[in-house]
Each structure stands twice: as C-alpha cells, then as structure tokens.
C-alpha cells in the first residue's frame, strides 16, 4: 500500500505535537495554504488575463510588480492576520514593515520576512518561480507594537526558513533546524507529501549559476573563478555546465539536489549585490547550511551578517561546500 507522509504528520513525528501547535508551524501552515492558491493561479496565468502580466507599479527595488506578486502578497498578509501568530512582516513588495492588523496580531510572537514570488518576471514565459520565507521570534514584548529592531538580526537566529517552488511540480522545502525536508504537492488530495526527506547537498557539483552577461562587471577573483569553471581538464573536473534561470529559487533548488554553486556577486553599480539579505539570502543560506552546504559573501558567512535595514542586499555564493570554499580561496588569493 502506498505510504503517504503528509506535512502535518511529518511535523508531529519530527517536532512533536507541541511543535505542531507551535507558532512557527502555524505560520508554515498558513504559508502552505497560500501556496495552494498560488499553485492554482500560476497554472492558469497563461489563460487568465486578470492575473497575467504587470500591475504597472514598481517595488522599492525598481522592479516591475507582476499581478501575481500582488496576489501572493495580499493573500499572505490577510492569511497571517487571521492566524495571529505573526505580528509583522517585511515583504519584497512593501517599502516598510507591515504591522499586521489582525485581532491577535500584536500578541504574535513571530515576525516574517518574505519574497512572495521570487523570479516573478518569469511567469509570463513559463519559467519556474517561487516563494521564499524566513521566520524569527520577535524581541519586542508580545502585546506591544513590533519594532524595526526585531528585524535587525543575524540569519543564524532564524527559527524557520524555506521556499515553495512552482515548477514542473509544486514543492515545499523547509528547515526548522532539524535538517531539510522536501514535500511535493499532490493536487488530487491537496496535500504536500514528503518526497525528499533529509536533503543533503552534494559536497561537489558540476554546475555554476551566475548572470554571465555581467562577467566584465565582477571583481577579478570572481572572473578567475568563473574561468576555472569553464576550463576543461582533469585538474578542474571541468568544464562545468552553466545553468541560470533568472529565478534564484529554481537555481538554488537544482543545486540542493544535484550540487553546484549559485552566485550573485558584487558589481561596480551594485557593490553589495542585488539579492536581499532578509528574504532571499538568509533563508536559502539557512537551508543550504542545514543540508551540509556553504553560503558566503565571499568574505563572511551570510548567516553571521547582522541586518541593519530591511531591504539591504548582499553578495551571495552558495551551494556545494567544496565549490563555495574554492570560490572563497580565489578571493583570499586575490588579496
Ligand atoms: P538578474 C529575480 O528578480 C531575482 O531576485 C532572483 O530570483 C534572480 O536570481 C535574480 O534576481 C536575477 O537577477 O540581475 O540576473 O536578472
């Protein structure tokens, strides 16, 4: 008989019934509920004009907001407000901290940083997109207003992090500090079922992900490392395969399963890179480290960075331990 382990069953068996009813897993179930709505909408974006394309607005980063970005963001906020476990949210789609206005939100003990739809510019061309999330326990006292300092934390303080990837299948991948588990949505029963227990990222990999078009803008040591990836020969194990989708979630997920390195390096016009610390780099770095990989700025561990603004960015080199360590070696040797 087919053995099905649903998300709820897995949470109870891994974290206990106390964990099941704990705040972070209430928040996780709320994110999962919205992901099922997203699954439904994304899979018909090609035929329903009302959710396809842009809103004509731009976010704080100057990026065009897609209709599905707004749909995801609005649904997430309203769902979290109804739940009451979360008191405030930082979202890629909102300039400032969102103080949730649910009846019990002020008593919520957690805060959430989220990219509601990473890679959303790819929706209209049918490329994989995803939601990325990160949960912390608030520092300010429950019952009062959440404070900005609640978000100025290091990624090592995360209680829960994960992503939901809308690709050839819809998957949830998360960690709460006991390894990384992957669940695949079975739309016929509306459940995320355990499909990738205790994911371990291969220590080596033969794929590298970077926006090659910006090669000339990267620091010399990054160009040297990319050149290494392109060289053939026994000493490099190369040439490596180049894979870059323009959706971080898709590139990170591939590396999680097959090994490889994902890079968004500093450039002349973006010396601190493009990807956001709170709701892109920290959650994927927590997951990658829990899966045995490595995530760095080139100089320091991503999870050691103490955030000082809610939309700050950081360079990121993340994936297979040995590949990321080699990139760091190129940087050290360039000093
Ligand atoms: P570029 C999508 O906008 C995103 O935030 C990540 O998902 C993706 O990896 C990156 O930006 C792509 O940026 O500058 O290479 O187009």
Image (cartoon, rainbow, N blue to C red):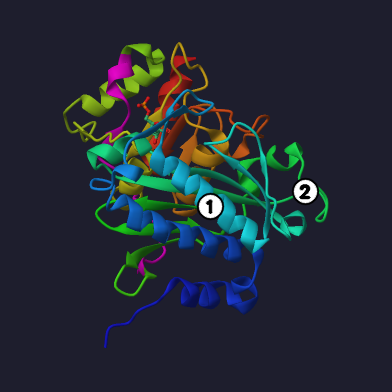
Front in this rendered view, residue 331 or 295? 295
Label 2 neighbour load within 10 Å: few <14, some 14-19, many 20+: some
Residue 136 appears left or right of 280? right
Q: Can residue 312 be spotted in the picture?
A: yes
Label 1 neighbour load within 10 Å: few <14, some 14-19, many 20+: many
Front in this rendered view, residue 97 or 137? 97
Question: Which numbered circle lies on residue 76?
Answer: 1
Q: Residue at x 37, y 33 (%)?
A: 54
Q: Residue at x 25, y 40 (%)?
A: 206
Give residue 12's quadrant in the image: bottom right
Q: Residue at x 31, y 17 (%)?
A: 215
Residue 248 appears left or right of 61? left
The residue at which mark 2 appears reads as: 139
Front in this rendered view, residue 55 or 205? 55
Q: Position of residue 14 (x, y in %)?
A: 53, 73
Q: Position of residue 94 (x, y in %)?
A: 57, 35
Q: Residue at x 65, y 68 (%)?
A: 22
Q: Can residue 199 be spotted in the picture?
A: no
Front in this rendered view, residue 91 or 103? 103
Residues marked 2 and 1 touching at CB (< 8 Å): no
CA separation in Å, label 2 and label 1: 22 Å
Identify whether 295 is placed above or below 315: below
Stretch in magenta: 194-215
As helix, strand or loop, the secondary structure at mark 1 comes to helix
As helix, strand or loop, the secondary structure at mark 2 comes to loop
Q: Position of residue 326 (x, y in %)?
A: 39, 32
């Amino acid at each position: 008989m087919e053995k099905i382990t649903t998300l709820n069953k897995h949470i109870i068996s891994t974290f206990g019934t106390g964990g099941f009813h704990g705040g972070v897993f209430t928040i996780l179930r709320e994110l999962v509920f919205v992901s099922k709505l997203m699954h439904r909408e994304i899979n018909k974006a090609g035929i329903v004009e009302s959710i396809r394309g842009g809103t004509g607005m731009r976010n704080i980063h100057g990026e065009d907001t897609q209709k599905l970005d707004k749909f995801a963001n609005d649904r997430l906020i309203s769902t979290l407000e109804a739940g009451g476990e979360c008191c405030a949210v930082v979202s890629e789609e909102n300039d400032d901290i969102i103080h949730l206005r649910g009846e019990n939100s002020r008593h919520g003990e957690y805060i959430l940083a989220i990219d509601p739809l990473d890679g959303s510019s790819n929706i209209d061309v049918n490329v994989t997109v995803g939601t990325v999330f990160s949960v912390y326990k608030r520092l300010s006292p429950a019952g009062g207003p959440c404070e900005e300092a609640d978000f100025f934390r290091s990624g090592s303080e995360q209680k829960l992090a994960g992503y939901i990837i809308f690709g050839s299948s819809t998957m949830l991948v998360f960690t709460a500090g006991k390894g990384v588990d992957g669940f695949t949505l079975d739309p016929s029963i509306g459940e995320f079922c355990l499909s990738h227990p205790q994911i371990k990222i291969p220590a080596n990999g033969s794929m590298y992900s970077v926006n090659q078009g910006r090669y000339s803008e990267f620091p010399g040591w990054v160009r040297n490392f990319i050149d290494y990836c392109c060289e053939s020969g026994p000493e490099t194990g190369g040439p490596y395969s180049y894979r870059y989708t323009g959706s971080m979630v898709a590139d990170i997920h591939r590396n999680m399963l097959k090994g490889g390195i994902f890079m968004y390096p500093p450039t002349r016009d973006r010396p601190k890179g493009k990807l956001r610390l709170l709701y892109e780099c920290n959650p994927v770095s927590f997951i990658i480290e829990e899966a045995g990989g490595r995530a760095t700025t080139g100089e320091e561990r991503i999870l050691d960075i103490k955030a000082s603004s809610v939309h700050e960015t950081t360079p990121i080199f993340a994936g297979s331990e040995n590949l990321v360590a080699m990139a760091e070696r190129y940087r050290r040797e360039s000093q």
